[in-house]
Image (cartoon, rainbow, N blue to C red):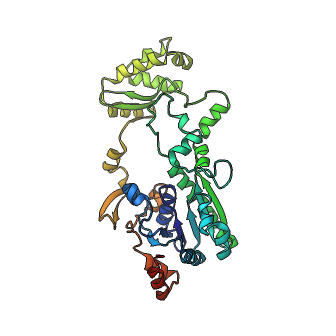
Amino acid sequence: MTPLKGVRILDLTHALAGPFCTYHLGLLGAEIVKVEPPRVGDDFRDFAPDTFDAVNGGKQSVTIDLKQEAGRALLHDLARGADVLIENFRPDAARKLGVDWDVLRAANPKLVYCSISGFGASGPRAAWPAVEWSVQAAAGLSAMYLDDDADPRDLGIGMLDIFSGTSAVIAILSAILEQRRTGEGRRLEVTMADAALTLASSGLAQQLSGERVGKVKRRPAVGRFKARDGRVFVMAAHQRWFGKLAEVLGAPSLLDDERFATPAARDANAEALRETIEARLAARDAVEWQDALLAAGVPSAAVVQLRSLVESGYYDDAGMIHDVWSQARGKAQRAAGATFSGRTIRAAPGEVPALGAQTEAALGRFGVTAERLEALRKDAVI
């Protein structure tokens, strides 16, 4: 199943959010031409090679020096033969390089042009350099789940790059549908700051209502409690679930204890309740409690490491995990495939390209002649 077969995408992105986006468009069948600077390429090739390999399988690597006039002219020609262009330059960089929306739209009015940035092309933060963690801090996201007294080196959970990339996929798919219907292109702008607001929306609702400022509200019978060999997550916020928890723990009398009989009482005696729960859980392993609680209808799960879950083969039948071969590194690594469509699409990524490995072949498919290729190579444009 390749719904984007025949769609040609120019990928001018680097690092994570943009490559994650184009990787998934490639898994959906699009042809991804990854444009990289000669000799250095995407900085994640050296800085984070495992991450690079995980989100660049199946792409064609073409090297073009966009700082040279001949390189910009070449990209303009490629844009004429493309359906989509995706970039994640800082907002003013694309304009300075002459590959911004206004210029490329003139070359191809049907082009869908997607920009991914930290804070957008306008506004007081537009010029800020942006990474996952700085945007989380500036957008109020990390303050929702990291305590002020936590180790300052604790960065939290990397989520904005991935969610921004996913948001870009959704926007691009929508624009491709519009392009097919109207024959016109569109400029799309996806920002990590907007993605942060979306991820924080439920917590924001609580804050705006005055319920709580800061972390998500803690509930006394919800959390990752210590069992004999690890931790088990339990969701027993509702009275019915709490009653089931008490039964599974072999302590039905908890419902008669005035400290725990009602949600308000449990709130007031949260620490005592935690100690009581964990004293019972200490008798058995986390998986045993998980199974017993699930059988009773209480949402529960033993807390596991993601690596161990992947190695268990849990995701294999879903078509989510693949061995990805890196041409440059000469080895394979396991990586996630179509992470938001794998159970339906079941697409396996191709090889991770070495820097510039497909330059001549890909440019030839865009109509660049052998004579021009020779001249571009001679001038170190490609």
Single out the residue that lies furthest toward the bottom: 371
Q: Is residue 311 above or below residue 349?
A: above
Q: Residue 99 in the image: state x and y as whole percent.
A: 60, 69
* Front-lying residue, 230 or 33: 33
Could you tell me which residue is drawn at 53 percent across and 48 percent down?
160
Q: Residue 370 in the image: state x and y as whole percent.
A: 46, 87
Q: Residue 157 in the image: state x and y as whole percent.
A: 47, 42
Q: Is residue 211 left or right of residue 246?
A: right
Could you tell me which residue is drawn at 51 percent across and 29 percent down?
148
How many numbered dots are placed on residues in this image? 0
Q: Quadrant of residue 174?
A: bottom right
**Residue 176 in sight here:** no
* Front-lying residue, 74 or 162: 74
Q: Quadrant of residue 246?
A: top left
**Residue 265 in sight here:** yes
Could you tell me which residue is drawn at 48 percent across and 58 percent down?
20
Q: Is residue 74 above or below residue 150?
A: below
Q: Is residue 320 above or below residue 330?
A: above
Q: Is residue 7 left or right of residue 300?
A: right
Q: Residue 132 in the image: state x and y as whole percent.
A: 51, 47
